[in-house]
Image: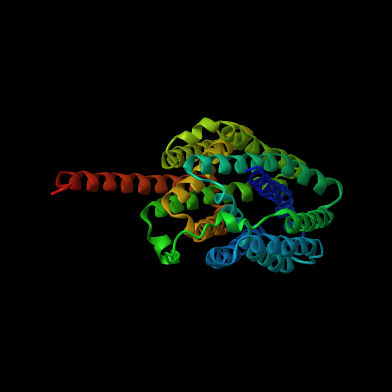
Amino acid sequence: MRQTAIDKMHIFIVMFFMSLVMSIQAPIFAPYAAKLGASSVLIGIILSVASFTNLTGNLIAGPLVDRFGKKVFITLPIFVSGGLFIAHALASDSTSLLVLRALNGFSLAFLIPSALALLSGYAKNSQQQGKNMAINGILGTIASIIAPVVGGLLGSSIGFANTYYVIGSALLLIGIYTTHFLKEKENIIVITSQRKPLSLIQVLQNPNLQMVYLTGFALMYIHGVVIYEVPYLAVEEGLSTATTGVLFSFLGVGTFFSLSLLFINRFDPMKRLVIGLFGMCMSLFAIFTQLVGLSIMLFLLGFFFGIMMPAMATALTDAISSDGHGRAFGVMSAVYSVGMIASSFITGIVRDVLSPYFLAFLIGMLVLIVIGYSRIQTGRTNALRTPYDGV
């Protein structure tokens, strides 16, 4: 038991520092790309292309993770990403940045499904699963609070290129740590069944997972709009990257606050997803109408984001057996990428004629309507079948 706890701690450490280092670039990418000559539309395209390559990698990663194990698909992408971030500092134009971002998106596609699948193996039931995912979410949120401020300060003090040198070097150090301390934990993957592993088609046809994935798309579309719009304030309104870093921290503080309410994990994960998405939609509407200050609304967006993320992972693992977790998390990461692709690309195109916040609000509400209709139809079907049970 002690060794298992230590091994799980190493997973948390790796994921925390990955989140920390990766989030450092949040407030500096848009102004760095603009400095290299990218327009708002091109910045959206760059983010979309990176998300598309991430999507491609996610779909490839799931089956490979289930077949060949997790550690190799955690360690190798970290080293590759470290090198690519260092190359970001050497980019001479926006085209080079687009290529590097695309390659980085593909390499990191293998990391998240592998890490989540490895972590999910340490849970014996849904409650432990929720606790593990909540702890991971809390650590990631702490990183998201600290990192944007650090990134903004680094961008202001040592420049964008040197900040990317720091990010790349830090990732290489994380890769070395992962190589030495992360355990594959083959004993967790107990060979107790001769069943054929679940196929990707079976995962996609699972109706419960379909609702989780639809919610995940809406969540990441909203998240992508925020990731695009907040840093662009530095370009559009002449704010410093330190200021946009502080704004991102409000998002992180809200997420940390909700993740700290561990009793929330006792409630049904799908109900948490619906409540969280509704809250995010209302926050977006408030930003669009400028009813309340941006910092407060970012805090609320983060709060509802924190409600949804552990629920997303718990709903996924509840809906499918452990031999399909790699594929299921791979598809989930792919859905996240689709949300980011759509939000980045659409936001870059429409932001001059339509508020991206309002469009994200409409998309979130549409998803809520679809989920509500689906649950009503499921309830009616079950009610019709009940009188004939046992006949």
Answer yes or no: is residue 340 visible.
Answer: yes
Q: Is residue 290 left or right of residue 194?
A: right
Q: Which residue is pictured at 74% across the width and 45% down the height?
A: 238
Residue 183 locus on image (x, y percent): 67, 55
Kindly identify the residue that appears in the image at 49 percent across and 43 percent down.
Answer: 311
- Colour mapping used in the image: rainbow
Question: Which residue is the extreme one toward the left?
Answer: 391
Of residues 197 and 270, the one drawn nearer to the viewer in this rendering: 197
Residue 328 visible in the current orientation? no
Lateral position of residue 386 relative to residue 283, left or right: left
Give the camera-side residue of 113 and 41. Answer: 113
Q: Residue at x 62, y 35 (%)?
A: 256
Quarter of the image where the N terminus is located:
top right
- Where residue 325 sits: x, y (%)? 50, 56
The residue located at (60%, 63%) in the rendering is: 69
**Residue reaching furthest to the right:** 158
Q: Nearer the viewer, residue 329 or 177?
A: 177
Q: Quadrant of residue 247?
A: top right
Relative image position of residue 111 (x, y in whole percent) = 63, 59
| Left-right relation of 34 to 127 | right
Could you say where residue 284 lies in the image, as x and y percent from the top left? 52, 40
Q: Number of marks in the image?
A: 0
